[in-house]
Amino acid sequence: MAEGLFRHALLAQDEPMKSLLVSSAGVSTYDRQPAANNAVTAMGKVGIDIKNHRSEPITEALIDRALAFFAMTDTHLAMLSFRVDPPPSNAFLMRQFIGADATDEIPDPYGESLPHYEACRDSMVEAIPSLLQVVKSLYEAQLTDKSADQ
């Protein structure tokens, strides 16, 4: 759901943001599993089709090429840190940039009812504007670093 929402949000941005690649990878998933039916339904209700999505486990190659990682829970971040040594400095909670009053974590709806998936989706939607700003800042910093190296 996060991949679909973020990809959709990037379409409304100017280049080069519009062309950034977005992917989703799990710290505890099987490869090539379809999105949960409730995830597909929840996303369909906001006009985003994820029925062709397939899961992908996090890999060293993905970590090496990622601008940023956004996790739903502290547990997801801890699992990423456990799998990667040293832990990536570009890993964050999806909601940590919203503001002081916001809850940082998004409960994982895996195996839950449709209302849980809809609540998860809505929590992600609320985070998207702040994530766009974070990614834009990281992207610009990366360009500045590359220019300095040349």
Image (spheres, rainbow, N blue to C red):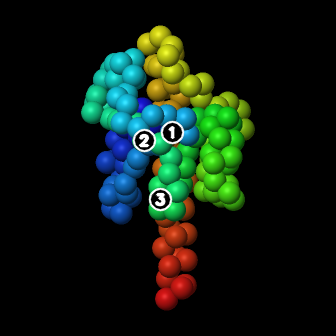
Residue 97 visible in this rendered orientation of the protein: no
Q: Residue at x 63, y 48 (%)?
A: 83
Q: Name the residue located 62 percent from the left edge and 37 percent from the top edge.
A: 76
Q: How many marks?
A: 3
Q: Please state which of residues 45 and 81 is positioned toward the viewer in this rendering.
A: 81
Residue 143 lies, with reference to residue 53, above or below; the image says below
Viewer can see residue 143 = yes
User: What is the CA distance from the residue labelled 2 to the residue labelled 1?
Assistant: 6 Å
Q: Residue furthest right?
A: 100
Q: Secondary structure at mark 3?
A: helix
Q: Which residue lies most toward the front here?
A: 30
Quarter holding residue 36: top left
Q: Is residue 22 left or right of residue 88?
A: left
Question: Do the numbered discs 2 and 1 sit on residues whose CB atoms are within 8 Å?
Answer: yes
Q: Quadrant of the N terminus?
A: top left
The label shown at residue 61 is 3
Question: Which residue carries the number 2 mark?
Answer: 56
Mark on residue 6?
A: none
Q: Position of residue 29 (x, y in %)?
A: 49, 34
Q: Residues within 10 Å of mark 3 (few under 14, many from 20)?
A: few
The numbered mark, 2 or 1, whose residue comes first in the sequence reads 1
Q: Residue at x 46, y 19 (%)?
A: 118
Real-space CA distance between mark 2 and mark 3, rounded to the nearest whole angstrom: 12 Å
| Residue 99, x across and y down, in percent | 67, 40
State the image coordinates of residue 46 (x, y, percent, origin top left).
Answer: 34, 25
What residue did someone put label 1 on? 26
**Mark 1 and mark 3 residues within 8 Å of each other at the beta carbon:** no
